[in-house]
C-alpha cells in the first residue's frame, strides 16, 4: 500500500504535491518523494521518513516547475533503504520518472527479461523499478520522436506493459517536458482517480490514489481510472484517455474499504464511509443472531478506522456507544509499521484507556480487522487493566487467513493470527471472552451496494482466491520466504533501535 499523486498545473506544483502527500500519508509512512519538471529539467527529493520530515524549506525551493509526481511508501518487498524511496528515474528514453502503488506477481521473471533481453540494469529490488523499466523499454521499442507528442505511441506502450505485467498496480509516470501518464492494472485492484481545477490561467489536472487528495487540493473529481485504462495529460493541459487492456475485469481490493482508505474518500464510485456504516449494521445483525441475550454494556471502537462501523453497530444493538481510548496522533498506524517489535511497543504508546468507560462493565471492542493480533491482544489487556468485567471483540472484516500479493503487507501466513485457527482459538489467543467476525458475503454486500457495476472484489486475504489467476502455490511459498527474510532484517533493525533507546 502506497500513495501516488501527479499534477499538471499553470503554476509551481511543489506545494500542492506536498499537501497532497500529507493527505495520503496514511497510505505509507516509510518514505516520501517528489520530482518536478521545469523546462525539461528534473528536480528530485526523496528519503525515508514522513512527508514533513523529508521535505524542508530548502528542498521545496529547489523543486521547480508546473508539473510533477509524488509518492509515500511503505514496503511490502525489497528493503527499507532510502534508495528504494520513490519516484524512480530512468534516463532512456526521454527521461521518465514513475511512482507506483501495488505489487507485480511476475516481477522476478520481468527482472530476468529486462537484464538479459532488454539490456537494462536494475539498481534495487523494487518491483516499481521493474514497472518503470518495462514502460521505458516499450516506449523505446516504439520509438516516439523526442519532441513530438504522440499519444497513440504512449498508449501503445501501456498496452504492451499490460501484456507483460501481472498483479495489482496503479502508477503515475512523468515523461520529461511532455506530460504525466496515469494507468491502472486490468483488474483495477489498486485505486487511482483523476480530477480537474479551473483557473484563470487554464485548466489544471491531478491524478491521485484517493479522491480525498483531489478534493483537499481544490480539484473536482472527474472519475476513477478504469481497470486497464491509461490517462495522459500534456504539459499544456490537454487530457487523453484510452482503454489499453484487451481484457479488463473490475475487481478492486475490498481491503481498501475495510481499512486502507480514508473514510472521506470515494473509491470506484463507492463511499468508503457508507461502506463502513453498512459493515457495522451487518456485523450487529450477526452478533444478535449468535448472542440474542448478550450482556454488552457498552460498545467501544478501537480508533480510528473502526469508529464508522462501531456507531451503527451500537445503535443496532441498542447499546451505549462510548470513546474508551484516547489516541496519540503522533504515533504512526501500527498495521503498516515494519517490524513486530516496533508494532507491539507502539500500541501502548498510541492508545490510552479511559478507565471510567471500562470499570465494572462488559465491553464490546470493535475493530476494522484483525491481522497479526498484536494490537487486539494488547488492547484487550488494556481493557482488563482498566477494570472491564468481560471483554468481547467484533471485527468488521472476516478472518485474514491468506497472504495478500497485490501490495498489502500480509506476506507470511504464519504471521496471520487466523491461520489454521478457529474463531474460538483466536479469541483465546487475544484474551477475549468471545469474538465475532464479519461474514465475507456481508462484507462484499457492504461495498457492492455502492457500485453495482463492479463484477467482483479482490477478497484474496479472506478467501484465498486471487483475481489475476496467476498466483500458484510455488509463488506463495516463494514470496513468503522472501518476505520472511525481509521481516527478519527489519526485526534486527528494530532490536538495534530498542537497545539504543534503552542505553540512552
Image: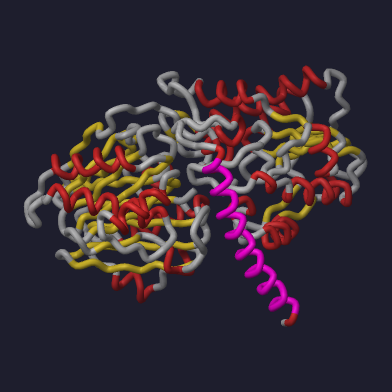
- The image position of residue 324, as x and y in percent, is 76, 45
Query: Based on the displayed image, in which of its 4 quarters is residue 424 positioned?
Result: top right
Q: Quadrant of the C terminus?
A: bottom right
Residues 370 and 281: in front is: 370
- The image position of residue 368, as x and y in percent, is 65, 38
Residue at position x 28%, y 32% in the image:
245
Q: Is residue 382 above or below residue 187?
A: below
Q: How many marks?
A: 0
Q: Relative to 148, is 263 on the left or the right?
A: right
Tell me, yes or no, whether the highlighted magenta stretch contains residue 152.
no
Residues 160 and 230: in front is: 160
Tell me, yes or no, whether the highlighted magenta stretch contains residue 490.
yes
- Read off the magenta span: 474-502
Q: Main secondary structure of the magenta part?
A: helix
Q: Is residue 182 visible?
A: yes
Residue at position x 81%, y 44% in the image:
430
Query: Based on the displayed image, in which of its 4 quarters is residue 15 positioned?
Result: bottom left
Q: Is residue 74 visible?
A: no
Residue at position x 44%, y 60% in the image:
125
- The image position of residue 198, as x and y in percent, is 22, 43
Q: Relative to 235, is 145 on the left or the right?
A: left
Residues 279 and 162: in front is: 162
Q: Is residue 146 above or below residue 183?
A: below
Residue at position x 49%, y 39% in the image:
264
Q: Is residue 449 above or below residue 28?
A: above
Residues 456 and 261: in front is: 456
- The image position of residue 17, as x and y in percent, is 35, 57
Q: Relative to 295, is 332 on the left or the right?
A: left
Amino acid at each position: 500500500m502506497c500513495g501516488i499523486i501527479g499534477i499538471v498545473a499553470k503554476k509551481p506544483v511543489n506545494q500542492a504535491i506536498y499537501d497532497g502527500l500529507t493527505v495520503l500519508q496514511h497510505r505509507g509512512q516509510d518514505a516520501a518523494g517528489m520530482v518536478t519538471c521545469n523546462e525539461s529539467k528534473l528536480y528530485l527529493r526523496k528519503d525515508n521518513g514522513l512527508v514533513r520530515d523529508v521535505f524542508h524549506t530548502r528542498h521545496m525551493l529547489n523543486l521547480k516547475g508546473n508539473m510533477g509526481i509524488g509518492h509515500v511508501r511503505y514496503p511490502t518487498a525489497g528493503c527499507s533503504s532510502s534508495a528504494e524511496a520513490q519516484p524512480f528515474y530512468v534516463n532512456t528514453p526521454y527521461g521518465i520518472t514513475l511512482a507506483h502503488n501495488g505489487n507485480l506477481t511476475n516481477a522476478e521473471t520481468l527482472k530476468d527479461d529486462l537484464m538479459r533481453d532488454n539490456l537494462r540494469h536494475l539498481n534495487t529490488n523494487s518491483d516499481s523499478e521493474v514497472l518503470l523499466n518495462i514502460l521505458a523499454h516499450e516506449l523505446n521499442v516504439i520509438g516516439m520522436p523526442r519532441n513530438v507528442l504522440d499519444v497513440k505511441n504512449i498508449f501503445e506502450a501501456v498496452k504492451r506493459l499490460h501484456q507483460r505485467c501481472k498483479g495489482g498496480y496503479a502508477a503515475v509516470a512523468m515523461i520529461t517536458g511532455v506530460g504525466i501518464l496515469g494507468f491502472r492494472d486490468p483488474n483495477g485492484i489498486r485505486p487511482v482517480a483523476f480530477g480537474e481545477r479551473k483557473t484563470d490561467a487554464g485548466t489544471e489536472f491531478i491524478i491521485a490514489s484517493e479522491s480525498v487528495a483531489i478534493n483537499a487540493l481544490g480539484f473536482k473529481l472527474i472519475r476513477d481510472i478504469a481497470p486497464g485504462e491509461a490517462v495522459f495529460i500534456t504539459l499544456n493541459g490537454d487530457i487523453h484517455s484510452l482503454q489499453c487492456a484487451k481484457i479488463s475485469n473490475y475487481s478492486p481490493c475490498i481491503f481498501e474499504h475495510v481499512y486502507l482508505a480514508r473514510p472521506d474518500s470515494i473509491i470506484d464510485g463507492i463511499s468508503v464511509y457508507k461502506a463502513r456504516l453498512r459493515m457495522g449494521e451487518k456485523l450487529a445483525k450477526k452478533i444478535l443472531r449468535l448472542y440474542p441475550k448478550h450482556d454488552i454494556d457498552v460498545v467501544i471502537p478501537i480508533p480510528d478506522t473502526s469508529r464508522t462501523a462501531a456507531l451503527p453497530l451500537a445503535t443496532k444493538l441498542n447499546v451505549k456507544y462510548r470513546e474508551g481510548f484516547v489516541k496519540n496522533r503522533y504515533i504512526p498506524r501500527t498495521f503498516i509499521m515494519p517490524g513486530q517489535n516496533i508494532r507491539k511497543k507502539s500500541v501502548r504508546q498510541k492508545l490510552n484507556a479511559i478507565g471510567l468507560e471500562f470499570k465494572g462493565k462488559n465491553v464490546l471492542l470493535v475493530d476494522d480487522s484483525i491481522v497479526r493480533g498484536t494490537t487486539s491482544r494488547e488492547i484487550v489487556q488494556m481493557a482488563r487493566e482498566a477494570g472491564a468485567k468481560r471483554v468481547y471483540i467484533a471485527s468488521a472484516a472476516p478472518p485474514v487467513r491468506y497472504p495478500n500479493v497485490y501490495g498489502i503487507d500480509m506476506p507470511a501466513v504464519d504471521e496471520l493470527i487466523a491461520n489454521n485457527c478457529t474463531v474460538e482459538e483466536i479469541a483465546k489467543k487475544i484474551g477475549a471472552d468471545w469474538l465475532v467476525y464479519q461474514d465475507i458475503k456481508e462484507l462484499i454486500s457492504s461495498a457492492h451496494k455502492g457500485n453495482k457495476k463492479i463484477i467482483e472484489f479482490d477478497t484474496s486475504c479472506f478467501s484465498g482466491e486471487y483475481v489475476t489467476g496467476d498466483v500458484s502455490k510455488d509463488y506463495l511459498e516463494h514470496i513468503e520466504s522472501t518476505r520472511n527474510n525481509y521481516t527478519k532484517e527489519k526485526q534486527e533493525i528494530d532490536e538495534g533501535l530498542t537497545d539504543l533507546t534503552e542505553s540512552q
